[in-house]
Image: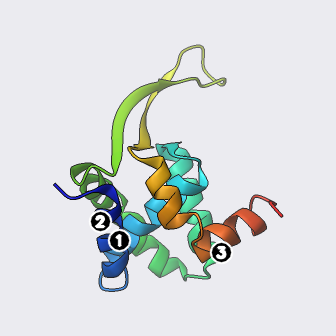
Amino acid sequence: MESSTEVIRELKEKEETDVLWKTCCDILRAVTILHGSAWGSDLEGTLTELWYMKELGTDRIEVLRKKIKDALKILNEKGIVTSQKRLRADLSKPYPTEENMHTAKDFVTLLREFGGDKDVIRYRREIMGYR
C-alpha cells in the first residue's frame, strides 16, 4: 500500500491531465484550507470560492462541480480522505440534519503537500483575510 505522501504526489502529477484529478487536488486544497475536515456544504462552498478566485469560467466550474462525487470516492478509496454521514446542528430547525463529513486521514502530510500551495496561500490571504 502506498503512503499518503506518495498518493498525494501522484495526484498532483496527474492534476493537469484530467478534470477528475484536478477536482481531487482541489478537494485536498479545500480540506487543507478548512483545517483537515469539512462538512459537505462547506467543502462545496470553499471549492466554488477557490474556483472563482482562480477566475475559471462558469462552464468550467460546472464541469468540476459534477466531478466532486467521483473525486471524493477516489480519495476515500486511496485512503486520503474519510467521508461519513453525521448529524449536524441546524439552528433553523428543531432537529439536526444528516450531512457528509469529509476528514483528512493524515492532515500533517496534507499540510506538507498543500500548505505551501499558491492557491491555498492566495485563498487564505484574499478570501479569509489572513496576512
Using the image as rendered, state which of residue 4 and residue 70 is in the foreground: 4
> Left or right: 2 with respect to 85?
left
Say if 16 sits above or below 46 in the image.
below
Which amino acid, by three-letter code, is at mark 3? Answer: Met
Residue at (60, 73) in percent of width and height: 119
Can you tell which of label 2 and label 3 is closer to the viewer?
2
Using the image as rendered, state which of residue 66 and residue 18 is in the foreground: 18
Rendered image quadrant of residue 129: bottom right
Q: Which residue is mark 2?
A: 6
Q: CA distance from mark 2 to mark 1?
A: 5 Å
Residues at marks 3 and 1 touching, judged by CB atoms closer than 8 Å: no
> Left or right: 57 with respect to 25?
right
Residue at the extreme bottom of the image, as rendered: 17
Q: Position of residue 30 (x, y in %)?
A: 53, 58
Q: Which residue is mark 3?
A: 53
Q: Position of residue 64 (x, y in %)?
A: 41, 71
Using the image as rendered, state which of residue 42 and residue 62 is in the foreground: 42
Say if 45 sits above or below 119 in the image.
above
Residues at marks 2 and 1 touching, judged by CB atoms closer than 8 Å: yes
Q: CA distance from mark 2 to mark 3?
A: 28 Å
Q: Position of residue 104 (x, y in %)?
A: 42, 46
Q: Which residue is mark 1?
A: 9
**How many residues crowd mark 3 within 10 Å: few (<14), some (14–19), many (20+)?**
some
Which amino acid, by three-letter code, is at mark 2? Answer: Glu
The quadrant of the image that shows the N terminus is bottom left
Residue at the extreme top of the image, as rendered: 94
> Quick one: label 2 or label 3, which is nearer the N terminus?
2
